[in-house]
Image (tube, helix red, strand yellow):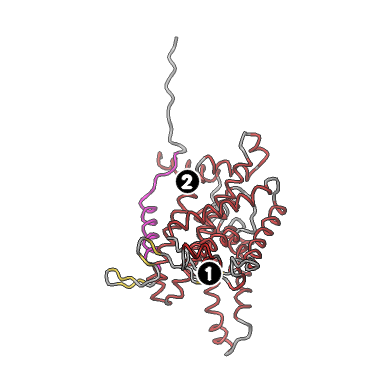
């Protein structure tokens, strides 16, 4: 009996290894992220470093929404509600709000609970994830416009709920908001104080920037692992064709609920950081417009592509502030006075930029590479190497 010849392996579709140029790019990017607050602070002051802080918060928000919209293909117009949940959880657990209105809490914590941040973050994640499941469960059979309307309503319900929960029992302090939220204090290291290292002074906005960067890196790592896992492939199958995914044996109900829960948990983390950073939260910070901005970060950058979503979040966080600070001086330089209100010009140019980008880059500024393009590129590269 003739023996079966061994199978010859080939590396024709082997992904390219990381080159020196790619490694150098990662090193340069890491150095830029580390030194960005110093460079921006030296050029424009702490205001622009604060803008960077909010850019990192929007990165976490956009990555969380990308799990729902980009990975699973579920349109969510009320995502900012989970941001609000995280912010109010931080406010309840690190301010005197509850102690001032509930005697039994005041008997335990006279000045408020003031839990450490490493306790608040998991609680904010868990509560936001639970809210995500509560939103996802009734909407499992909805798609497209109908799902968008329901999620929009959920976001508005949460904001109105927070706005009116000051009577008959004052829980959220209504439209006046909750103040006195304790800053981040990690094992005795107070982020609200100026710290000196190697002769350089680091104001609080610098310290919060690095804290937000670390959390953003953790969120990025989790998103990458999820995208390339069985769960990520199940989300992609549901996004492309839910009926076919169900026919292949995917439990679409649980997978969709998991997408809502995971995306909401990242929003809860970002909200908790926002509350600690601001020291104050109110319902006006969580309007429908904020949900649109976060969704625009995902769509503008490239749905389902993590680097693109990060790029979109950074651009949409910084670009409006650049317009805000330049439109007034530009009008004075050209006309000697303000012809159009600065805020109107900012919104006009902001919207115009979005329209132009969507017309000429419909898939986003940095869309996810298509599978067939990736295979062709790898095959071409290996053919060149063999030649």
User: In x, y percent, where is residue 26?
Assistant: 39, 56
Mark 2 or mark 1, which is nearer the start of the sequence?
A: 1
Q: Is residue 204 above or below residue 113?
A: below
Using the rendered image of the protein, determine whether residue 312 is visible from the camera's viewpoint. no
Q: Residue at position x 72%, y 53% from top?
A: 146
Magenta stretch mostly in which secondary structure?
helix
Using the rendered image of the protein, determine whether residue 207 is visible from the camera's viewpoint. yes
- The total number of labels drawn is 2
Measure how far apart labels 1 and 2 are at the Cα level.
Answer: 43 Å
Residue projecting furthest to the bottom: 336
Residue 234 sits in quarter: top right
Residue projecting furthest to the top: 1
- According to the picture, the residue beneath numbered tag 2 turns out to be 225
Q: Is residue 360 above or below residue 43?
A: above
What's drawn in magenta, residue-wise?
A: 14-36
Horizontally, is 311 left or right of 76 in the view?
left
Residue 363 sits in quarter: bottom right
Return the mark for residue 89. Answer: none
- According to the picture, the residue beneath numbered tag 1 turns out to be 100
Q: Residue at position x 65%, y 37% from top?
A: 246
Q: Residue at position x 44%, y 44% from top?
A: 381
Q: Quadrant of the C terminus?
A: top left
């Amino acid at each position: 009996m003739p023996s079966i010849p061994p199978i010859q392996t080939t590396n024709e579709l082997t992904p390219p290894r990381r080159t020196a140029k790619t490694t150098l790019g990662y090193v340069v990017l890491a150095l830029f992220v580390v030194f960005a607050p110093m460079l921006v602070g030296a050029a424009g002051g702490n205001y622009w470093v604060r803008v960077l802080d909010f850019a990192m918060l929007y990165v976490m928000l956009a990555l969380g929404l990308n799990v729902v919209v980009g990975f699973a293909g579920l349109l969510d117009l009320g995502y900012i509600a989970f941001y609000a949940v995280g912010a109010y959880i931080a406010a309840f657990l690190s301010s005197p709000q509850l102690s001032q209105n509930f005697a039994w809490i005041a008997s335990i914590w006279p000045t408020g609970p003031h839990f450490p941040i490493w306790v608040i973050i998991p609680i904010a994640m868990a509560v936001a994830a639970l809210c995500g499941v509560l939103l996802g469960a009734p909407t499992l059979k909805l798609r497209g416009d109908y799902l968008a309307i329901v999620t929009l309503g959920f976001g508005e319900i949460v904001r109105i709920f927070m706005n009116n929960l000051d009577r008959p029992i004052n829980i959220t302090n209504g439209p006046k908001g909750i103040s006195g939220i304790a800053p981040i204090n990690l094992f005795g290291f107070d982020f609200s104080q100026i710290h000196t290292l190697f002769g350089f002074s680091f104001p609080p906005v610098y310290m919060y920037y690095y804290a937000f960067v670390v959390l953003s890196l953790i969120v990025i790592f989790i998103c990458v692992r999820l995208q390339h896992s069985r769960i990520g492939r199940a989300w992609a199958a549901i996004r492309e064709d839910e009926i076919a995914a169900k026919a292949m044996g995917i439990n679409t109900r649980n997978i969709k609920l998991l997408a809502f829960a995971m995306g909401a948990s990242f929003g809860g983390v970002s909200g908790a950081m926002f509350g600690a950073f601001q020291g104050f939260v109110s319902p006006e910070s969580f309007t429908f417009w904020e949900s649109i901005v976060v969704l625009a970060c995902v769509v503008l950058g490239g749905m389902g592509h993590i680097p693109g979503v990060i790029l979109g979040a950074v651009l949409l966080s910084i670009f409006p502030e650049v317009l805000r600070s330049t439109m007034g001086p530009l009008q004075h330089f050209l006309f000697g006075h303000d012809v159009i209100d600065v805020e109107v010009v900012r919104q006009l140019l902001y919207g115009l930029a979005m329209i132009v980008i969507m017309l000429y880059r419909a898939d986003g500024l940095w869309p996810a590479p298509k599978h067939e393009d990736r295979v062709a590129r790898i095959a071409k590269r290996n053919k060149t190497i063999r030649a």
